[in-house]
Amino acid sequence: MKAKRTAATLVLGLVVLLSVPAAGRAGETIVGQPSGDAASPAAQGADARTYLAALVEALGRRWPTNRTVNIVCHGHSVPAGYFRTPVVDTFNAYPHLLHRALKERFPCAVINVTVTAIGGEDSASGARRFAGDVLARRPDVVLIDYALNDRRIGLAAAESAWHSMITNALAHGSKVLLLTPTPDQRARLDDPADPLNRHAEQVRRLAREHSVGLVDSLAAFQRVLAAGRPLPDLMSQVNHPNRAGHELVTAELLPWFPAPPEPGSG
């Protein structure tokens, strides 16, 4: 009988196969680290090694001192799990892959990963329902992923909406992880002036300005494409990633939840 492959093994295996060192980065590429200089506080505002330290400590507790940890994934069709519309492939989308990987990393934790994403939505709409749909769940950490659809409302409207969601989450004691967009096959990913790249850059800036976490999904895809992987291999349709694409996003999320040290390692 074949051995069962875990979600974490799938994610890390994909990163080993596809990751390449960022230009000018000293030393070896560390599997599972955020893309490029994402681990640097100067690059993203928050340090992946420490930003969720209190939450990671809570995840590592055992009964009877543990508690439920709430993670909310807010955004559009990608975190909602749409693959080839109208099919919603929940169990191959990054919120579920993250949940599985965290449970393997923290086997004694009680974790709720809730999806409040709506297919077709932009951040202006997401901000309007943020209090009722997201904050009402008392999240420990909120993931925000709207940039793919925000191209239709423009940079200024998107910035206002993201600023509102970030500040409201922080005011309620939640940590925040901002996600740059996954690709659209119609976008010019090598052109900094393309709207998808401009929205990604705005998300990076917002992470710096608010000192919150950055999950640079677009940079992860661009790194893999530069290594020679065709974009259609990572997509289920023109603007939705497939399982392999969602695994790339999951690999960018996991370093924000560092694994506890092995017994006897320190």
Image: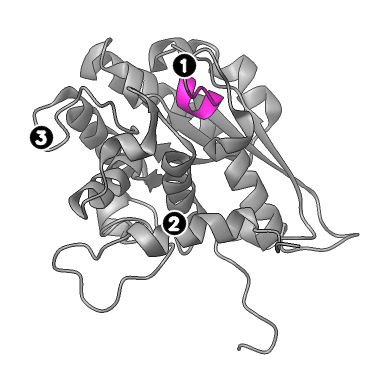
Q: Secondary structure at mark 3?
A: loop
Over which residues does the magenta segment extend?
76-83
Vertical arrangement, residue 154 with respect to residue 44, above or below: above
Quadrant in which residue 236 is drawn: top left
The residue pinned by badge 3 equals 192
- How many tags in the picture? 3
Q: Residue 122: x, y in percent?
A: 40, 14
Q: Secondary structure at mark 1?
A: helix
User: How dense is the environment of label 1, judged by Cα within 10 Å: few (below 14), some, or many (20 and up)?
Assistant: many
Quarter the C terminus occupies: bottom right
Q: Residue 261: x, y in percent?
A: 62, 77
- Between disc 3 and disc 2, the foreground one is 2
On screen, residue 186 versus residue 13, left or right, reads: left
Q: Which mark is residue 14?
A: 2
Vertical arrangement, residue 137 with respect to residue 46, above or below: above
Q: Residue 104: x, y in percent?
A: 69, 59
Inspect this view and state whether residue 52 appears: no
The residue pinned by badge 1 equals 127
Vertical arrangement, residue 150 with respect to residue 174, above or below: above
Name the residue: 54% across, 56% down: 10
Quadrant in which residue 22 is drawn: bottom left
Name the residue: 24% across, 32% down: 202
On screen, residue 204 versus residue 261, left or right, reads: left
Q: Amino acid at mark 2?
A: Leu
Mark found first going from the N terminus, 1 or 2: 2
Q: Is residue 235 magenta?
A: no
Q: Amino acid at mark 3?
A: Pro
Residue nearer the viewer, 56 or 84: 84
Name the residue: 44% across, 43% down: 244
User: CA–CA distance between discs 1 and 3?
Assistant: 27 Å
Name the residue: 68% across, 23% down: 136
Q: Amino acid at mark 1?
A: Ala
